[in-house]
Image (cartoon, helix red, strand yellow):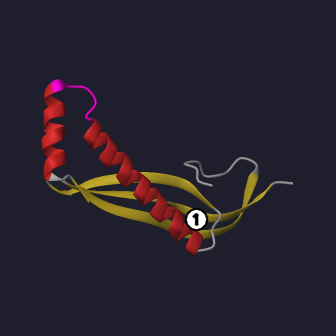
Amino acid sequence: MTTTSTHLEGHRVTRELGVVRGLTVRSRSVLGQVGASLQTLLGGNITLYTELAEKARQEAFELMVEHARALGANAVIAMRYDANEITDGVTEVLAYGTAVHVEPLA
């Protein structure tokens, strides 16, 4: 379970296990760059960049969840994303949150 909130409805936190994160670094391929450049001429949604961004976020999210599981967590609260350009065409995407163990409320 993951949430951007600081609590999970219907559950109580029994243990906080610390900050967890998943980090991926992505770059655009030459072919992808050319294709995206052509899409910018037409305007609208640049699907090649959208797909790249979605893939990077999904990978970072999955790595964060793996990190949380390794700590014994069954949930991540206060989950967020961050992204930064490292250099031209190379971007890091970070998913992070607080790993916790929760139990359903009685």
Residue 36 at x, y percent in the picture: 18, 39
Q: Quadrant of the N terminus?
A: bottom right
Q: Is residue 15 left or right of residue 18?
A: right
Foreground residue, 52 or 92?
Answer: 52
Q: Main secondary structure of the magenta part?
A: loop
Q: Is residue 11 left or right of residue 30?
A: right
Residue drawn where x is 58% and y is 65% of the image: 99
Residue drawn where x is 15% and y is 48% of the image: 31
The residue tagged 1 is: 99
- The vertical placement of 81 against 40, above or below, is below
The amino acid beneath tag 1 is: Ala
Residue 87 at x, y percent in the picture: 16, 58
Residue range highlighted in magenta: 42-46
Foreground residue, 19 or 28?
Answer: 28
Residue found at the far right of this picture = 106
Residue 80 at x, y percent in the picture: 46, 52
Residue drawn where x is 17% and y is 40% of the image: 35
User: Quick check: is 87 in the magenta stretch?
Assistant: no
Q: Secondary structure at mark 1?
A: strand
Q: Is residue 78 left or right of residue 25?
A: right
Foreground residue, 52 or 101?
Answer: 52
